[in-house]
Image (cartoon, rainbow, N blue to C red):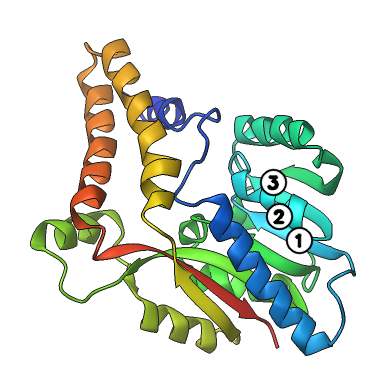
Amino acid sequence: MDQQELPKFFYEIFDSSLPRLGPGDDASTRKALEILLSARARVTKAPNSRPLRILDIGCGNGAQTIQLAKHAVGMITAVDNHQPFLDELRRRARAEGVSEKIELRLKDMRALDMPKGSFDLIWSEGALFVMGFRQGLEACRDLLAPGGLLGVTELTWFRPDPPAECREYFANMYPPMTDTAVNLKTLSDCGYEILGHFRLPESAWLASYYRPIEERLRALRERHAGDAEKIGVIESVGMEIAIYRKHSAWYGYVFYLARRP
């Protein structure tokens, strides 16, 4: 399989029709949003009725975008670099009656080219790692207005003693992965006031994300049975799922919630 086929096959696995394109669930999105909006109300001593300028970075097919549109007052700019994901988000937004609150932009998150201080809330679930956690936080801070809010998830070690299999897997797959304390310090070092953090539940991985993918992998194994390279990619995704099922006590996503002072 040549280098042009690899991205195409990646999107065949992570198709826009999947419920989600990363770990998460509606309840966690709403919980994070509630924490941020409650903190904003305490600081401003005003109700959360002023429209927010919201940026959703790496929105994918928009599971979290829809929740933001339903539960936050304001206009959302949803950014992704894959048009079929944006097309699916548009379809879902229309079905949910919130399309007028969402503006779609086909962009690379590493080249957003947006005015500094132009957003009141920046959101990114399972995507900020593409820029690098620190680099992503710095980019978001520049885009936030003073007092602006941030909600991001990041893959995080829960315990310092992961089994060798798990440790070696992430040493190859995501070497920058670290623990909650280090990530919170990084937020502080980047100039944020920390408002809270919490772990995503296992169901946000298994029920919302991995089980639909497993069904897709079964179909793809049959479709590409004679293609060793594609089967290898399929098996690598299966390995990721197997690692989580065995070692979820040691790692997962943490929602980090913060404010630009």
The residue under label 1 is which amino acid type? Ile
Kindly identify which residue carries mark 2.
Answer: 68
Dot placed on the residue nearer the N-terminal end, 1 or 3: 1
- Give the CA separation, mark 1 to mark 2: 9 Å
Dot placed on the residue nearer the N-terminal end, 1 or 2: 1
Kindly identify which residue carries mark 3.
Answer: 66
196 to the left or right of 245:
right
The residue under label 2 is which amino acid type? Leu
> What is the crowding at mark 3: few (fewer than 14 residues within 10 Å), some, or many (at least 20)?
many
| Between 55 and 68, the one nearer to me in the picture | 68
242 to the left or right of 126:
left
Secondary structure, mark 1, is strand
| Between 198 and 87, the one nearer to me in the picture | 198
Kindly identify which residue carries mark 1.
Answer: 54
* Residue at screen point 79% across, 46% down: 102
Name the residue at the left extreme.
164
> What is the crowding at mark 2: few (fewer than 14 residues within 10 Å), some, or many (at least 20)?
many
Nearer the observer, disc 1 or disc 2?
2
Secondary structure, mark 3, is helix
Q: Are marks 1 and 3 in contact (CB under 8 Å)?
A: no
Q: Are marks 1 and 2 in contact (CB under 8 Å)?
A: yes
- Give the CA separation, mark 1 to mark 3: 12 Å
> What is the crowding at mark 1: few (fewer than 14 residues within 10 Å), some, or many (at least 20)?
many
| Between 182 and 9, the one nearer to me in the picture | 182
Secondary structure, mark 2, is helix
Could you say which quadrant of the image residue 220 lies in? top left
